[in-house]
Amino acid sequence: MNLHELTVIDTEKIALDDLLFSEENKTALLQTIKEHQYLEELKKYNLKVDNKILLHGSSGCGKTSAAKAIANALNKNIVIINLSTLINAKIGETSRNVKAIFDKAILERAVLFLDEFDQIGKSRESDDKDVGEMRRLVNTIIQLFDYLPSESLLICATNHFEVLDTALLRRFQIRLKFEMPSESELNLYYDKILVGFPIHLQQIERKYKISYAEALDYIHTKMKKQIIEELELRDLNTKVQFI
């Protein structure tokens, strides 16, 4: 299995200012970005930068977008692991594949993003059907974490913080929780997205108690319906004029 099959190509550029999350998370991420921007200067004082970040919490609340925004802010490519391919590899291949991907990210000085990290970082005490393979995999990941160069940046994301191996958790210098947005936070998000559409289409009913991703899907669905209805009406009027 080659590296191309194990990674996802994603060229989407996201600005950190375009994201909505807590001030605590924003402060922590900005500090990390600044540390990597001034990495060489900090090295002179024997100061190590934080380069292992865990983003955890509800699905659709900005973890993947945050990882892309960090890579963009640092002007680095982002290497995203295709975990569905990785974990379906033959027994014994998974650890080698993970190491190969780490090597690729380090060589390219890219941001390495491991989404759904719980699939490969489960506790070694779990009741996984192949406990031996899982233990070997977690041991490999711990070693890769320990020897990750300071100029490399690893970001992992999970919706299932509670199942991660405790030894892995200890190695993350930064752990940020992404929670479901409040009504006021969703209103800010709705305002931000809706401003790109004609004013007369912006007055849609707003849904709450959903994630940012669900809100975006909802807006796009509503807008497509409204725009198509207007286009159909325009076409109908055009036909009537020629009758």
Image (tube, rainbow, N blue to C red):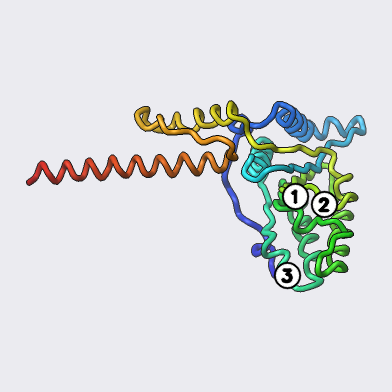
Instruction: Give whichever of discs 2 and 3 has the lower sequence position.
Output: 3
Instruction: Give whichever of discs 1 and 3 has the lower sequence position.
Output: 3
Q: Position of residue 92 (x, y in %)?
A: 81, 71
Q: Which residue is mark 1?
A: 160
- The residue lying furthest to the right in this view is 46
> Dot 3: few (<14), some (14–19), or many (≥20) neighbours within 10 Å?
some
Q: Secondary structure at mark 3?
A: loop
What separation in Å lies between label 1 and label 3 (alpha carbons)? Answer: 22 Å
Q: Nearer the viewer, mark 2 or mark 3?
A: 2
Q: Which residue is mark 3?
A: 89
Q: Are marks 1 and 2 in contact (CB under 8 Å)?
A: yes
Q: Residue at x 80, y 39 (%)?
A: 175
Q: Secondary structure at mark 2?
A: loop
Q: Residue at x 77, y 46 (%)?
A: 154
Q: Amino acid at mark 1?
A: His
Q: Amino acid at mark 3?
A: Ala
What separation in Å lies between label 1 and label 2 (alpha carbons)? Answer: 7 Å
Q: Which residue is mark 2?
A: 164
Where 192 sits versus 62, above or below?
A: above
Q: Amino acid at mark 2?
A: Leu
In screen coordinates, is 222 left or right of 59?
left
Where 197 sits versus 107, above or below?
A: above
